[in-house]
Image (cartoon, grey):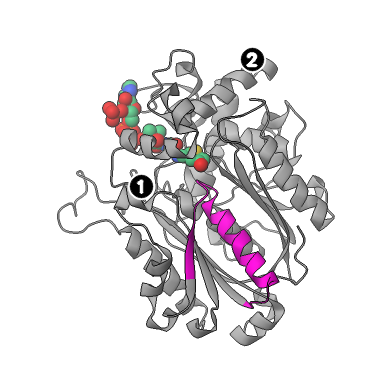
Amino acid sequence: MKPMKPVYIAAQAVTPFIGKGNPNFIDKGHEEFGVRENPTLEDHIVGVVRKLIDDHHIDPTLIQRGYIGNFAGELFSHQAHLGAMVARADERLSGIGFARVEAACASGGVGIVNAIESIQSGLDVVLVVGAEVQTTVRAREGADYLARAAHYASERSIDDFTFPALLARRAKAYKEAYGLSERDLAHFSVKAYDNANRNPMAHMCAVKMTLEQAETASDGNPKILKNPELHDHLKVSDCSQVSDGAAAVLLASEAGLQKLGRAMEDAVKLRSYGFCTNPLGEVKDLLELDTAAAAAGEAMRDANITPQDIQVAEVHDCFTIAELMMYEAIGLAEKGKGKELVLSGRTSIEGDIPVNTGGGLIGFGHPVGATGIKQTAEIYRQMKGQCEDYQVQRELNLGLTANMGGDDRTVVSLVLENTV
Ligand code: CAA
């Protein structure tokens, strides 16, 4: 879709993503254990909204509508009705309509779609927040909650770690069809960790990953799947993180930018978007992310661009195989050739098509409801030269996001254009 009425990102904010392995995450081994607690879901939501308002001097009374992407607040934090939670961030937000949007790991992306379409229906300033807290339970229990993003009745039993197993199933099929080594997949993991090491906001900012570590199963990098057919096709280094965090973007029409006092050069234009859903549990071809291909294809068609025009991208690397298949779904690589792109270095920060510069879901982290919004904020920050140690050192005018819910069941893709 191409918005009839132009839509701009007027401002963005992201909280640091944390979880196991992050120096600020309090667990039993931490020196502040018992002294300080990790931020709650409410802390993340309130914190990111206040950050957006304060950092960009936003008058909250100008916000006319808001959406919050969240997948499983009830399960991880015993908290639903998160639209009304947003209003706790600032008393001037009282009375504005906010609602939660749920589409598994694409909740954030679908929140942005709702905001764009609200602007098409006449509003000028719409807030989109995304947040998730997942570290309140062990990873095995969390895997059961996350499995609700699959077709629970038919797919839960594939493995205790349902989503890792669903994507390991794709890795196995891909290896059989095209050939793919552990070292090939390790390159995706190493790129994610290397980028995260340059990004102090990233969950894995302090964790190093070498090619040798990522390609070899070990006590520190175990194969966690019990399903005998899938056991060999996934290690911990292939996985995105169980993270807590939040992100927010403020979308505005041209009139909205003026009301907010934001200059055009402070904005990024949302040139087009694609939004597709396919039936849960009915993946047709393990070798293709066809929902992602449809959403990104729609976004690029309506932006009147080809994959070769994209200068920076944020794609949903929930597992290493997902990033590879995203390259092919978007058209950055031909079918069966995705690994060549990462091996060539072209998708590194120094390459000609940098992908997931802040570390992606594997390195930056994956608080699922926040991810689609964080991806959008990342492209904004890259275009505006705000990424410090992981800044791409050239002008960036066109970027693309691809935010995936479930096993390629819901996908939102945005084409973003710098305004100056
Ligand atoms: N040897 C053998 N097995 C070991 C081991 C070792 N040295 N160390 C751990 N394990 C096994 C154990 O069985 C352990 O389970 P128990 O805790 O019950 O013993 C299991 O691995 C997990 O170990 P940990 O809990 O210590 O692992 P962790 O906390 O470091 O987490 C992870 C690692 C399980 C990979 C976790 O990071 C994870 O679950 N990541 C994926 C998150 C995910 O799936 N997100 C959703 C992505 S899908 C998407 O984006 C789309 C959507 O809509 C959902």
**Quarter of the image where the N terminus is located:** bottom right
Q: Position of residue 400 (x, y in %)?
A: 69, 53
Of the pair 107 and 344, the residue shown nearer to us: 107
User: Mark 1 highlights which residue?
Assistant: 134
Q: Are marks 1 and 2 in contact (CB under 8 Å)?
A: no
Q: Amino acid at mark 2?
A: Glu
SS class, disc 1: loop
Of the pair 8 and 356, the residue shown nearer to us: 8
Task: Give left or right: position of 243 versus 122.
Answer: left
Q: Position of residue 72 (x, y in %)?
A: 40, 49
Task: Give left or right: position of 110 versus 351.
Answer: left
Label of residue 176 in the image? 2
103 is within the stretch colored magenta: yes
- Is residue 381 in view? no
The Cα–Cα distance between marks 1 and 2, rounded to whole angstroms, is 34 Å
Which quadrant holds residue 45?
bottom left
Residue extending farthest left: 34
| The residue stretch that appears in magenta | 98-124
SS class, disc 2: helix
**Quarter of the image where the C terminus is located:** bottom right
Displayed-image quarter of ligand 1: top left
Of the pair 154 and 341, the residue shown nearer to us: 154
Q: Position of residue 167 (x, y in %)?
A: 53, 29
